[in-house]
Amino acid sequence: MRIIIDYEASWRNSFLDGSNDEALPKKGRNYVASMTELKKPENYIQRTVSKNTVLGILSRLIGDQRKLYQARQSEHFYFSDIENVISFEDKPKVINSEIAYLRNMKGSTDQNSFTGMIKVNDPIFQSDYSQEFWSVLALDLDELCDFIIDGIPVKDSINLDPISIMNRLEIISKIKPVEPEGRIRETSDTLALLFEKYNPLNKKEQQLILPMYCSALYLQLQRLEEHYDMSSAKTKAGGISGISNNGFTPKDFMKTYVTGGKKLIYGNPFIREEYVKGEGKIKHTLTKASGQLEIILDIDVEKAKELKQMIDNAGVSSFYLGKKGLAYVSDIRRH
């Protein structure tokens, strides 16, 4: 028996982790097609027509709308006895790569955005300690080393508002790593003794500059507590909002100082970019295929008649082939 299926624009990518062969987790499968998740190569998931796809289609055609793993686990799975005599041939005629905008409703937030008005009058920017505290970020690298090792007071100044602070952190984050030698090494070792979470080296064992400045803020917080009430500078957990010992997150930093909080992301284009040696930047987008799927069932005539009758009775006109697209049965042959 042969079942011929024509399909158009069948999506050949997956946007969720896990497997259709397993029961759904309590919170559902994770969405891995956000811009952040797509930076990981394993999250650009390509799909082809498989035996499971075919069994899912056949189940759908006879009116069984259960998920395939549920149907297989039940006592009444119609294809349980004939699974091993089912084969198929996928014949895609047209394969296109397109950019699709995916909706993401899981409540993700933009890494670098915020909403509402900026609260420049927050106590952390308007208190007696504010200039001494934030001006650590205005020091050059030599001055930072003197401040950390020798305790030399901060004499520089900085604009006391959230945007200026965030912009300064952005500038510092772009400073190239240096070799951990001399005064830099001594400064970093001092911070390592003070802060257990301090992690200043990259994979090449080079000294990162941003962790030094961020940890210096925490050091200044400790020093100023001897003279000021620093409670307004700290979160409930005792840290600095959006800033850790090793870096900062713009959305977490700004959420405290705006009226609207973080900016929700409702979707993103499905694009993965990567650099390939010898080729440069490559963009991977959504793959869509159109063509024909031929399902072959090596069954006797009576079984074929029964299956054909079940398909006719169910009356399924169109369905998805894999993810999205349009598919329909164009022909059923008993030989």
Image (cartoon, rainbow, N blue to C red):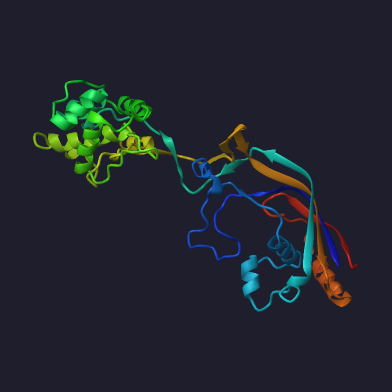
Q: Nearer the viewer, residue 307 or 272?
A: 272
- Residue 164 location in percent, x, y? 31, 24
Residue drawn at (73%, 74%) of the image: 78
Q: Quadrant of the N terminus?
A: bottom right
Q: Residue at x 53, y 45 (%)?
A: 104
**Residue 150: quadrant of the picture:** top left
On the image, the x and y values in percent for residue 18 come to 55, 58
Q: Quarter-wise, where is residue 56 in the image?
A: bottom right
Judge by depth and name the residue closer to the eye, 148 or 332.
148
**The residue positioned farthest toward the left in the image shown:** 227
- Residue 110 % position (x, y): 45, 38
* As drawn, 37 above or below 227: below
Residue in the foreground of this view, choosing between 164 and 207: 207
Please indicate whether residue 275 sits to the left or right of residue 156 in the image: right
| Viewer can see residue 262 | yes
Residue 201, horizontal then vertical, whole percent: 33, 38
